[in-house]
Image (spheres, rainbow, N blue to C red):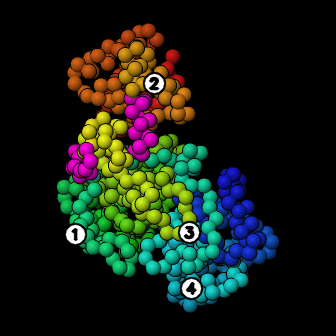
Amino acid sequence: MELRDYQEQLVHDLRLAIAQGYRRILVYLPTGGGKTVVASAIVQKIVKKGNRANFILHRDPLVTQTSEKFTDFDIPHGIIKSGFPENPNAPVQICGVQTLDARKLPIPPGLTLIDEAHSVSFYRKLQELFLEKERIILGFTATPFRRGKQKLTDLYDILVKGPEPDLLIRQGHLAPGRYFAYSEIDLSSVGISRRSGDYKEGDLQRALNFQALNQRVVEEYQLIAAGRQGIIFTCGIEHSKAIRDEFEAVGIPCAHIDGETPNTQRRKIYAAQKSGELPLISSIETLTEGFDQPSVSWLGVVRPTLSHALHVQMLGRAARTCAEINKTDFIVSDFGTGNLQRFGRLEDQVDVTLQPPRRRNSPGEAPTKICPNCNALILAWRIVCPECHADTGAEIEDVPEEHLSEYLSDEELDQRRHYRQLCRRAYERRYKPGWAVLSYRDRYGCFPADWWSFGAVFNNRDENARAAYRQYLEFLATKHGHDLRWVERYMAVEFGEGYRAEVSAQEMAENST
């Protein structure tokens, strides 16, 4: 199996670290970057030299995924995990950490690779492993962040990094995200667990599990993501079931999964979503690890967290590309959790180190606020909002919104404003709409987001605006030989409902002359 360039480089960097004498190596690669592929390439080299290896993980779906990938690499292997066939003589063993512990089995000899190392490394069974000075341990993770007393620096000596999410998005290996958020919900009544360092589940359910919010989750899905496959992250079992029931009440199939859901039932649910029969799954944290469904392109986040790792894991569930459905992006609908404000978007995860990350808005980082007029997240020092030009004043206001507002960086807000100015200029000069797209690309080197065209010229839908824009499009259709269908499609670009563009920015550019 051929590796991508950055995967080849990561394998090279790992071999170099081992040659330099490091024995406890943490390997960082974002979700969707191919951690199992990199691990398989390393194991393949080990086996070809006549040596042994073991791969330790903790969830059943990961066992199946890893076994399939090892088979792709022609790696002979066995599985030490309840419910799976064993092959004790194979040079490579895929080990369930719980099974090793329950059967009191020794960890097999050879190179050890640990999946989801940010959590699996701290299982009691593995503590004896880290005491073996000569054993080489490679811990793989997309989220090298931990809260609480136990730190990854207690176990690992060096971090070897692959590319960060922003680069993988720009290279087309991950899908770009679109982020929409409410103003933050009041969590002052929610306690924090001393054990986990995160919000207490019971308090979260009392604060967020109410019908008005649960119904709003359904309404926003119908508005901006209808027809997409998605996951809803909730605060607890009762909360998850309540949201599932709200979707079912309006005829949208939705299944609930929690930690007690039998594996046979889970597999049926996953298969139903993969086939398109089941669009939505509601869960708590069950799907944050070991869930691999590239067709998922919507996340409903109703689960506040103080865990950087959990936040990134949730976002990563929808970031994989999927050629089968021509997936071009994914949508995150954040229902007032504050997670985006605390930890940022997936592409904001930069400068990953073994040291605990600073909290956002700590000294040295620019604080943000929410514009009280349009709900855009902007830098706190801005007096005038760069998106809607409203006077934001000195105070940060928590204003309830009728619908979710898009969460953009300050740079992206400026870019969107510039693109919409170009759209208005094209209308005024009687240029085709694609002129604005090409002008934007000439300046920024990429296409604008498809949905930035909605309301760009008039920003309202009254009859006078519609009549004026139709007259403009009919003039262009006559001049360039387009039919009535072309007019209607471009009417939908300006006045469309929801957030699904009738005409993509790329198509607009191709039809600009």
The answer to which of marks 1 and 3 sits earlier in the sequence is: 1
The one nearer the camera, 367 or 106, is 367
Reading the image, the residue beneath label 1 is: 189
Residue found at x 25% / y 65%: 187
Asked where in the image residue 465 lies, by quadrant, the reply is top left
Tell me which amino acid carries mark 3: Leu
Percent from the top left, x then y, of residue 448?
46, 34
Give the alpha-carbon distance from disc 2 to disc 4, as whole Å.
Answer: 59 Å
Asked where in the image residue 390 lies, by quadrant, the reply is top left
Whether residue 325 is situated above or below residue 2 in the rendered picture: above
Reading the image, the residue beneath label 3 is: 354
6 sits to left or right of 238: right
Give the alpha-carbon distance from disc 1 to disc 2, as whole Å.
Answer: 49 Å
Magenta residue check for 402: yes
Q: Quick one: SS at disc 2?
A: helix
Reading the image, the residue beneath label 2 is: 436
The one nearer the camera, 497 or 118, is 118
> Is residue 352 among the parts visible in the rendering?
yes
Tell me which amino acid carries mark 2: Ala
